[in-house]
Image (cartoon, rainbow, N blue to C red):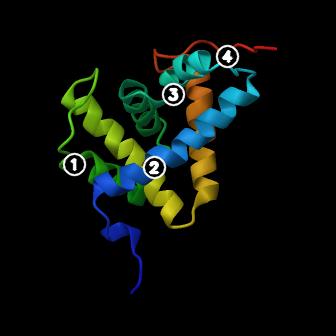
Amino acid sequence: MTFDPKQLNGIALAYMGDAVYEVYIREHLLKRGLVRPASLQRAAKDFVSAKAQAALIAGMEEANLLDSDETDIFKHGRNAKSYTHAKNTDVVTYRVSTGFEALFGYLHLIGRDDRVAELAAWCIQYVEEGKTGHGKKAASNN
């Protein structure tokens, strides 16, 4: 049996993508010098909340960062039927963030970790520059 990530539903891709993206964010926050759990959780929200991810995907679209296949995967995830309820956000934002996570999951599963790293770095910079409206200007915590 051949494993084809394109055959996975958007929710399954988002499940994988959530974990993949989270690792990049956690590593980034540790490298910034954050070590206390409460500080890490607060800072991570600027990167991983549904609202932040929706703003990130909008920024990617505005910057023409995604190719047509990546856009299709994002839409596949965004349009997936989810039976969970959005916490602290509206359904549309939650679905857009699901598409964001599906993109990361898909890229990882097809072995495009170079592209995952590139997009994660772009996202980190975008948030650090305050462009999502949820982050702070890059601050060094030395």
Tag in front: 3 or 4: 3
Rendering coords of residue 4 (x, y %): 39, 74
For the N terminus, the image quarter is bottom left
Q: Which amino acid type is shown beneath numbered disc 2? A: Gly
From mark 1 to mark 4, how far is it between C-alphas? Answer: 33 Å
> Which residue has dot 3 on it?
47
User: Which of the two labelled residues, at mark 4 and mark 2, occupies the earlier sequence position?
Assistant: 2
Side of 70 where 29 appears, left or right = right
- Identify the mark at residue 17; answer none if there is no mark: 2
Q: Which amino acid type is shown beneath numbered disc 3? A: Phe
User: Which of the two labelled residues, at mark 1 and mark 2, occupies the earlier sequence position?
Assistant: 2
What residue is drawn where x is 28% and y is 60%? 9
From mark 1 to mark 2, how far is it between C-alphas? Answer: 16 Å
User: Which of the two labelled residues, at mark 1 and mark 4, occupies the earlier sequence position?
Assistant: 1
Mark 4 neighbour density, 10 Å: few (under 14) some (14–19) many (20 or more): some
From mark 4 to mark 2, how far is it between C-alphas? Answer: 25 Å
Quarter of the figure with residue 99: top left
> Which residue has dot 4 on it?
138
Residue at the limit of the structure toward the front, as seen here: 37
User: Which of the two labelled residues, at mark 3 and mark 2, occupies the earlier sequence position?
Assistant: 2
> Which residue has dot 1 on it?
79
What residue is drawn where x is 34% and y is 56%? 12
From mark 1 to mark 3, how far is it between C-alphas? Answer: 22 Å
